[in-house]
Image (cartoon, coloured by chain):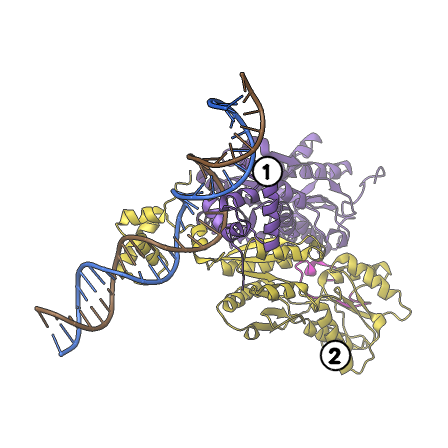
Chain colours: A purple, B yellow, C brown, D blue
Amino acid sequence: MKQRINIVELARHLGLAVSTVSKAINDRGDVSDATKRRVLEAAEKFGFSPDPAGRRLRTQTSETIGFVLSPPQTHFAHPFFLDLLMGIDQNLSQTPFQLIIVSARTLETELDSFRRLVERQRVDGVMFGRTRRDDPRIRYLQERNVPFVALGRSETGKPFPFVDIDRTVAGRNGTARFIGFGHRRIGLLSTPGYLMISHLLQEGYRAALKAAKLPFDAELVVETGTSEEGGLNGARQLLALSDPPTAIMCGHDLIATGAMQAITETGRRPGVDIPVIGCDNHPLGPYLNPPLTTFSAPTFEAGRRMVDLLLALMDGRSAKELQEIWSPELILRSSHGSQMVAAGEI
Amino acid sequence: MKQRINIVELARHLGLAVSTVSKAINDRGDVSDATKRRVLEAAEKFGFSPDPAGRRLRTQTSETIGFVLSPPQTHFAHPFFLDLLMGIDQNLSQTPFQLIIVSARTLETELDSFRRLVERQRVDGVMFGRTRRDDPRIRYLQERNVPFVALGRSETGKPFPFVDIDRTVAGRNGTARFIGFGHRRIGLLSTPGYLMISHLLQEGYRAALKAAKLPFDAELVVETGTSEEGGLNGARQLLALSDPPTAIMCGHDLIATGAMQAITETGRRPGVDIPVIGCDNHPLGPYLNPPLTTFSAPTFEAGRRMVDLLLALMDGRSAKELQEIWSPELILRSSHGSQMVAAGEI
DNA sequence: GTTACTTACGAAATCGTTTTCGGAGATTTC
DNA sequence: GAAATCTCCGAAAACGATTTCGTAAGTAAC
């Protein structure tokens, strides 16, 4: 049914040697423009394109890069990963590389997914997200010497390429805004502590506090799952404090969603009685009640860029020059509330 | 760096012929249990696993199935596709097959993504979702004779395998519930008309109307994009009618989200003044205001099942016996409102 | 003890490319 | 006009597996 043509048959049709045809198609080596054109035309006519299997065997390359989807509990509700995937694919589709994905069932078996990728499928490169401060995936990949690029930096191992959407600026600018509005006790609902973004968010939070000479109170920061439910429970805990926060900064929009729910439960109005800010610009943010103020997260572009970095790395560039930190921008809607005391901007 | 072992080196280590080793590893043909065990142990010890490139070249199979992500405007906000992907991968990871995905930029270039998959990457099978009544992708695949399974049925071409989460029951049961509550003018905010689910939803809607001997009014159904914005605009249009609907059935939760927004704009309360029901059980549904009543969509399971069907198809089973229609279930929260006139259940 | 049959293994062909290297002809150089 | 230099093109050797088919040894049958 397939009726696919061979490179040797194509060569015979043209009265050329297969080596010549190959060189013409790959635009490599000695072959005159005239015959190159002739070959390309014939290839087009017969619908010939080199069989990846043969080429891969010969070139000892899989022309494949793998992406591993983090365990479900951390991302089920995230358009995030799809954006990333689309960015990656859009860039990759311009190259001979193909994108293969595997999903990790749980945190415990996540490394198996990586092993499957590099040991069984023999990918040429790997991508993943949600880096951790101490990240065994990074250790594994560096040990096996397989090229990779991550979404997010880490404190693990030798330098590696990454694109990082800087959570410290979200933490710092978000709480600074609250402080500017007169708040002195600000809650922080963070993503799980092992994630790098959580650490960075808290760093930003502390920095803002320090800049305003406000004390740090450990009671006010709780780490929770990246989900509405996490936000719900975390905010309940915060609001039950004897001296509860008057504003809440959240490590993710889903967490903020749950937090607003918890605030409503206590009879207060989120955004007016207790302002809330999230992270990552979830598409549903504008439709929440009140619309959620948040920080941008250009994941599609990050995906595109990660491909550039990976290709550059495989091309021999050094990891250190392939690290990018992007600053997210505040997206003002209305959940951040307004001045506590009196007037001023916004 | 890779330091990977060959099948011939493995054979030499064992003092066996490569053919014997190959047969032992693939559990095929004539080889005694004793040597089979010996080979397997050695393979384990040396960390040998057959190079996919060699095997694929020889067996003339890519051991790859492709999934194409529908154009972004239709799914950016959908955890949906991720669930599906995870279901697919979980099942596929038990087989030698790998999952490669490509994304379609726009509806116009979508077919190119399919061509890339089958003509350049030579996948053994294809999967995709969001079937259309008249679906060029199906025509293309059937013409090229490549095995595929879709999420959703279609009216196109010869029979093909699919898993379909039946939108007619959502349409029928949703509007029937409204009718039971005393509503007589029910709006339908449907997904884009070319989609199969839209057609089926409307069929269900009409069926419920007919069963209650209520007239069909074309003014009351508007087709819109699968997004909050689509729901917002669609509902505005509905509410601006001279004789507007008193309840709204939506083809998707995101549409319902926008619709509730539009209702709020007019000073009415969604769920109490105008009840709303959605489809597909978006994870944010419980956190909307009011929590959204909707229909279930077991996409993870659907993904798993699609793999079964594809494998069965490639195994020679006929398409007609590989078609499954699943009934979604109503998930009661509170946006569906309650009895208009008086009392009764819920 | 010869024949027939079964079992377990091996030699070699094959899948479709790419790449190296050699060499024929054309072109330039002195 | 011979020598040196370019330009193109082709023959053949990999790459790493699977599969066909042949054959030696072992077993059973008579």
Q: Tag 1: residue type? A: Leu
Q: Pick the quarter of the image with the C terminus of chain B.
A: bottom right
In percent of the image, x 78 and y 59: which residue is there?
Answer: B230
Q: Quadrant of residue A188?
A: top right
User: Which disc is residue B308 wearing?
Assistant: none
Q: Quadrant of residue A304?
A: top right
Q: Chain under label 1?
A: A
Which element type, helix, strand or loop, lies under badge 2?
helix
Q: Nearer the viewer, residue A4 or B116?
A: A4
Residue A309 circle label: 1
Residue B332: percent from left, percent from top? 68, 69
Residue at 82% across, 59% down: B233
Residue C16 percent coordinates (x, y) = 49, 52
Depth check, mark 1 against mark 2: the one in front is 1
**Residue at numbered disc 2:** B207
Please, what secondary structure does the residue beneath circle 1 have?
Answer: helix
Q: Is residue B251 visible?
A: yes
Above or below for A146 versus B203: above
Q: 10 Å neighbourhood of mark 1: few (<14), some, or many (≥20)?
A: many
State whether the magenta stretch is mostly helix, strand or loop.
loop
Rendered location of residue B245, percent (x, y): 84, 70
Front-lying residue, B141 or B288: B141
In the image shown, does B103 or A28 lie closer to the viewer? Answer: A28
Q: Which stretch did the figure color magenta? A: B271-291
Residue C14 locus on image (x, y percent):
41, 55
In which quadrant of the rendered image does the N terminus of chain B lie? top left
Q: Quadrant of residue A319?
A: top right
Q: Is residue A271 magenta?
A: no
In the image, residue B275 lies in the stretch drawn in magenta = yes
Q: Seen in the image, is A192 located left or right of residue A209?
A: left
